[in-house]
Image: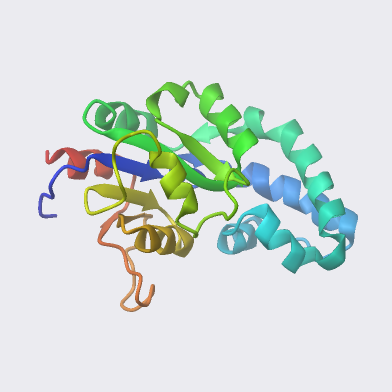
Amino acid sequence: MKAQPRPRAIIFDWDNTLVDSFGTIHAALAETQRAMGTEIWTLQQAKERVRHSLRDAFPVMFGERWEAAREIFFVAFERLHLDRLVALPGAEETLRAVARHCLLAVVSNKTGHYLRKEAQHLKWDGLFHRVVGATDCVRDKPSPEPVLMALQGSGIDPGPDVWFVGDTDIDLQCAHGAGCVPVLVRQAPPLAGEFGTMPPAFHVSEILQLKALALNQ
């Protein structure tokens, strides 16, 4: 891959980009779906369907009962999430290497309170300028509002020297909407036309490859 200019800032998605927490999300969601009497998704279905923040997704999934479903989910998630939290291979090495050269932040659709607890649990909170989650802004990702909050006070504005790294179409939409460089991290390369008018600028198959890309190594 051709070397690119070093970014001044890198904003990361969280789930399935830096950490593997889908087991927890799936378990809490299954408890919720069981209690609400709706279809219980498999782990693979959860991975494919979980994109938006809870406040955007649950009204569609549970209709007028979405607030009751939210309470059930949060009780289950609170019980499970820290014990099951696992950093993805190469994530910590990548973060610590690039943090010496550029500003780092997180923008996730995981509820901000839980997101920051997880960053603290992994002892990564000191690596990030800001950790922004769902409900921290008026609108969640893919709105550009969380990106603006993540960079607030840094002296860096969204632009071609700010990368947004994530694993889903929502991350790419957020990057394009904010005017950042969209970077897709997942094993499978993007298919032709898969992301329509919002494709990734770069693709890496694992997070450790981002270290070399960002540092021109």
Location of residue 166 in the rendering, given as x and y in whole percent from the top left corner: 41, 52
Answer left or right for 2 relative to 207: left
Left or right relative to 41: residue 178: left
Q: Position of residue 65 (x, y in %)?
A: 87, 61
Question: In the image, what residue occupies the spot 60% across and 63% down?
Answer: 49
Q: Quadrant of residue 101?
A: top left
Q: Let me know if residue 158 appears in the view.
A: yes
Please tell me in which quadrant of the rendered image residue 11 appears. Answer: top left
In the rendered image, residue 184, in percent from the top left (x then y), is placed at 34, 57
Q: Decide: is 186 above or below 76.
A: below
Reply above or below: 153 against 24.
Answer: above
Measured as percent of width and height from the top left, residue 212 is found at 19, 40
Whether residue 42 is visible: no
Q: Nearer the viewer, residue 215 or 67?
A: 67
What colour-coding does the image apply? rainbow
Please state which of residues 83 and 195 is positioned toward the viewer in this rendering: 195
At a point 26% along the width and 32% down the height, the residue shown is 98
Question: In the picture, which quadrant includes the C terminus?
Answer: top left
Residue 89 is left or right of residue 101, and the answer is right
Q: Total label count?
A: 0
Q: Residue 7, located in which quarter of the rendered image?
A: top left
Determine the residue positioned at 60% across, 52% down: 138
Location of the N terminus (image quadrant)? bottom left
